[in-house]
Amino acid sequence: MPELPDVEIARRRLEKALGGGTIVAAHSADRYVLRPRAPKTFGPALVDRTIREIGRRGKWLRLVLDDGTRLFSHLGMTGWWQTRSDDDPGDRSERARIDVLRSDGQKISLRYLDSRRFGRLVVNRQDIPEWTDLGPDLLSDGIDARMLASALSRTRRPLKDALMNQRIIAGIGNILATEALWHARIDPRSRSDALSRAEVAAVLRGLHTAVNRELAVRERARGDEWVDVFSIYGRAGERCPRCGSTIARVVMGGRTTAFCKHCQKRIRKPARS
């Protein structure tokens, strides 16, 4: 599933391609992706409107138009936006099409592709709860160690599960949590409320390292090309690149988690003050 870096790259590419353009046509016939609105409302809400802002929060994209209308997009597992020329034929997995006339006179056709249809497109006049209820975003809001420590101190859940709670931090998924905790040298099974302030700071540094490393590589990739930039994610059974021990695996919250038993410390109880 796309996580913060993937969605941020999608935002940057959309902003570069479409920012300031006017929507001249819009169509979707996919009732599932457009839930809860009917497809017939999609085009009329967008056509003849100018794109004023292309933003991101967590795993959600938001296009704000000149009349205040908002188009929200969640990529789900297989969703992706592609820009094409307006005469390119439709793709089998195409779920929506938006044609934009840019300020330089060039016409761009924006296609939303989603083979498994787990993504969502929502047109609304106001921000939706899925956007407003998210926790702080690592890139756009900034998160300090005190803020993160306060949030983690209120739950006894395993640390990796807590980091993936979108109300604690928006945009962190299985991959980023796994990578960040390896960088922080902390076992993903550690109890969230047991971390010291220094350990929380290490987690925060690990998150920034994981996000920035992936962003740097994704910027150079073509389209939705998959590039493996990970230190430990998906490498169970291989050697830890830091200490050489065999990378272990455990299932947490229904997801496979890779970690190093040797160099990632498991924190079980709060330190005595």
Image (cartoon, helix red, strand yellow):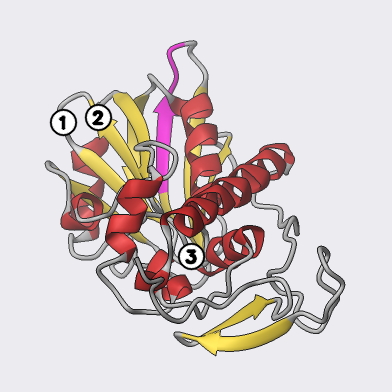
Three-letter amino acid code at disc 2? Leu
* Magenta extent: 97-103
What residue occupies the far top of the structure in this picture? 104
In contact (CB < 8 Å): disc 1 and disc 3: no
Residue 178's x, y, as percent? 59, 68
Tell me the distance, in whole angstroms, between the alpha carbons under discs 1 and 2.
Answer: 5 Å
Foreground label between 2 and 3: 3
Circle 3 sits in a helix, a strand or a loop, which is it?
A: loop
Residue 118 visible in this rendered orientation of the protein: no
* Mark 3 lies on residue: 173
In contact (CB < 8 Å): disc 1 and disc 2: yes
Does label 2 or label 3 sit earlier along the sequence?
Answer: 2
Left or right for 48, reference 161? left
**The one of 264 and 107 positioned closer to us in this rendering:** 264
Q: Which mark is residue 68?
A: 1
Q: Kindly indicate the quadrant of the structure image that contains residue 259.
A: bottom right
* Mark 2 lies on residue: 65
Whether residue 31 is situated above or below residue 56 in the rendered picture = below
